Amino acid sequence: MDVVVVNLLGVGLIVAIVWYFWLSSSEGAAAAVTSAGMQETHIVVKGGYSPDTINLRAGMPVRLVFDRQEADPCSERVVIDAFGVSAELPTGEETIVEFTPDVAGEYEFACQMGMLRGKLVVT
Amino acid sequence: MTLRDPVCGMDVDESGLRADGFDDLAFCAQGCLEAFQEDPSKFMTAAAVPAGALPVAVGVGAPSFAEAPPDTVHLSIEGMTCASCVATIEKTLKATDGVLDARVNFASQEAQIDVAPGRADIESELTAAVVSAGYGAAPIGDGQDEDAEATARDSHYRTLLKKFWFAALVAIPVMYFSYPELFPGIPEKGSTELNLIWGAMALLTLPVLLWSGSQFFTGAWAAFKHRSANMHTLIATGITAAWLYSTVALLFPDFFPEERLRDVFFDVTAVVTALVVLGMALEVRARARTSEALKKLIGLQAKTARVIRDGQEADVPIESVVVGDLIVVRPGEKIPVDGEVVSGSSTIDESMVTGEPIPVEKTEGTVVIGATINKTGSFRFRATRVGADTMLAQIIAMVRDAQGSKAPIQRTVDKVAGFFVPAVMIIAVATFMMWYTVGPEPALLYAVITAVTVLVIACPCALGLATPTSLMVGIGKGAENGILIKSGDALELAHRITTVVLDKTGTVTRGEPMLTDVIVYGADSEDEVLRLAASAERASEHPLGEAIVTGAADRGLELIDPDEFEAMPGHGISALVRGRRVVLGNLKFMADRGVAAGAAEELLAQLADLGKTAIVIGIDGELSGVVAVADPVKTDSIAAIARMHEIGLEVVMLTGDNVRTANAIAAQVGLDRVFAEVLPEDKAAQVKQLQAEGKIVAMVGDGINDAPALAQADVGMAMGTGTDVAMESGDVTLIKGSLTGIVTAIELSRATMRNVRQNLVGAFAYNTLGIPIAAGLLYPFFGLLLSPLLAGAAMAFSSVTVVSNANRLRSWRPTLAKGVG
């Protein structure tokens, strides 16, 4: 009896892991547009990127302000491969990254090891 | 009614934040209020300024009263509490004498101030102005970020070490009392005494879990919120499961009907935490070393320069040196910025920038590079590039960017890394189910141990670290040897190169014609013939003529101004020097001028076969000599090409020159294939042609005409001695401008990629073997089960191993002795 219960719980846990980590996705934050016509978003870097999904418009310059609040070396650099961005993020400082996405699509940004990830959704 | 925020000058509604005792003031934000309350007197004068007087617009265009581009001063600003502090500081800065424009960035807490050219020395005045406005300010030096980063890293390391020692101290007694069967003097299992001891262990390991292991929980939670999982998730789950099971077994033995199930694993919690934290600490240390090359480069920058201003020599900070400044350098001193020698001469050690160990001679008109060391003489030079424009600053920026870029191989690894941790969690759950369902008794105990072991042994870090750390060391190593690799892509591609295409002029050869031979026919001495020929050519502007003049000057011959000069373009020249009629030109020209030169015919053919241009000299109607001019092969080209053959590369030359000259050079340096008479616009097509043959092509060139071919090639290598356009189009810059750099770049790429492969194979093998063993795969066959303690040790040292392996690259040396040239 308890074998069945344990196995059912186990399967349920596996399904939950698959759903939570792979299938679901977060809503995403829209970037604010500044008076200078920049799409600006403040991203806190601490064990991950908050927000980790950023909605952007194509053809308008983007400014991402990365605010790294930890000394863990895992997050010491952010790489946005699609836009050739690779920036060092000193601890306790805000680092500005600017580029202009011209083509709509989903672009990933990540730490240099690819463990911390975020997504830019350009429409 | 609106009131004025005295701190930032913003108009605020009276319903905003207020300070007691100051009825006529309101504050836009808590930050401004706090700043005011700290020292109200600081802001009371500013408050007297009428409302609305402050400009709100950010980044107002600079008035263009200065013709030269303005200099920029950077200050870091402290104490900005809201966005409108920006306006206050900008206004203050703009009101300072000499300031053209000021921009304050709230996000980066920095001010960028454009000052009139040559006024960068007002930095201290600007700082004072900002301070008087109630904020903190400090000039930003280039090294500061690195220092702050190093400090943060250092304190992170020390905290980890403290956590390790605590966990390790707790682990020792906990280990001892966990095995009553193994160690003597421990009360019997099931006895009240042992239960009490175990209870104490539960309490003792709790701070290990919660303090020593705190980063696992914060890291896991932060990742969890972002729907991702990492090493912290696995460790946190593992050590918590071990502690919880043990505590429940101790407090509620009735939960477990079987006596055998009432076991505790407090040792797992303590030992795994201690080991993994130690591993993290060692990794922080090892990773700091991977960026050593960059730190070395930054450390090369000079701090001060001795500038002549108003006729006085003065030591000024490097930041305030401007283009056009006259700078004095004495023996043993560092050259502060890039420039051109105006007077004096010296030899300079440029090895730190070019990798070239032999000091280079510098005289009037030659270019000097900032951060290089003056050896023997004193000289003055005019600054041509300062600040971020200097060669060193550009090298630093390039290395920094390249180190963070990704190699294509890593993109594949990234995809795996994204799935790795959740997959391990699923395997852990499945392992638990398997052991619980079909495992031997006590099934629950085995299920918990194996699941925890799986969680603890998996190491996504080793996988993630494998490529970037090696890349970082490799690119840094390149910079140390005068090779700038622009991206991870270039570094990875370079190890697959099969064919190296060399441009001739300026790449294989020096790029400037030089006098190579003087052959005498008549009674005049060699020096006399050359002296007369060079004197005649003095008025000529032909490059061949210049080579003869330079050649004569190099031999220390004194030249005379010709009394009469006549040039026949395409044929030759005729001049009267000290009463002697000197004619220089080809055979036809000699015949025209009545000089019988038939005797030289055979020699001329020989010289042409060697790729040299020969000029016949007639003096007073007689054949007197022949001089030969050629663009000589760089001294180290032959050795470099030989080495390229040794490492299995095909070497091809591409040139616009004629077939005869091209073949002569090719024979001299030992090339496999030559494409001569190639028009500049066809160079890229020629590279494409080679690629169509299935070759991975590296193009090496220096000129603007090489740029398309550099871009077309799989890896474009630009000579650092060449044009900026070429360097921009290339993926690799060989600062020294020698072909040995190509060999070094390819060897470095091969060494780095070998290192990356070792790391990846190691990390993959570790995980693919470790996880099944941890899950108990060997148990049915050999009765072997991995201890979670061993799993923790293996995990902790796998990532350290990867980083240490990458650090091995630091001892890499190019095979071609740098002193060949």
Image (cartoon, rainbow, N blue to C red):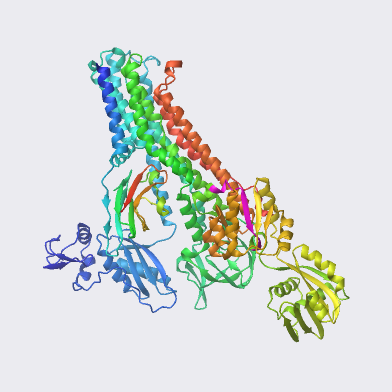
Location of residue B98 in the rendering, given as x and y in whole percent from the top left corner:
37, 75
Q: Left or right? Give the position of B478 relative to B110.
A: right
Question: Residue B384 lies in magenta, yes or no?
Answer: no
Where's the N terminus of chain B, which quadrant? bottom left
Write the start and end of the magenta stretch as one range: B493-505
Residue B116 higher or lower than B420, as above or below = below
x, y percent for residue B49: 20, 73
Q: Quadrant of residue B575?
A: bottom right
Question: Residue lying farthest right?
Answer: B523
Residue at 41%, 78% (x, y): give it. B66
Q: Is residue B190 visible?
A: no
Residue drawn where x is 19% and y is 61% of the image: B28
Front residue (pair A45, B545): B545
Left or right for A105, reference B806: left
Of B338 and B736, nearer the camera is: B736
**For residue B616, what is the image quadrant?**
bottom right
Left or right: residue B50 compared with residue A33 = left
In the displayed structure, B610 sits above or below B578; it is above
Q: Position of residue B173 (x, y in %)?
A: 36, 24
Residue B636 coordinates in the image, percent (x, y): 68, 56
Residue nearest the viewer, comparing B105 with B208: B105
Is residue B502 within the magenta segment? yes
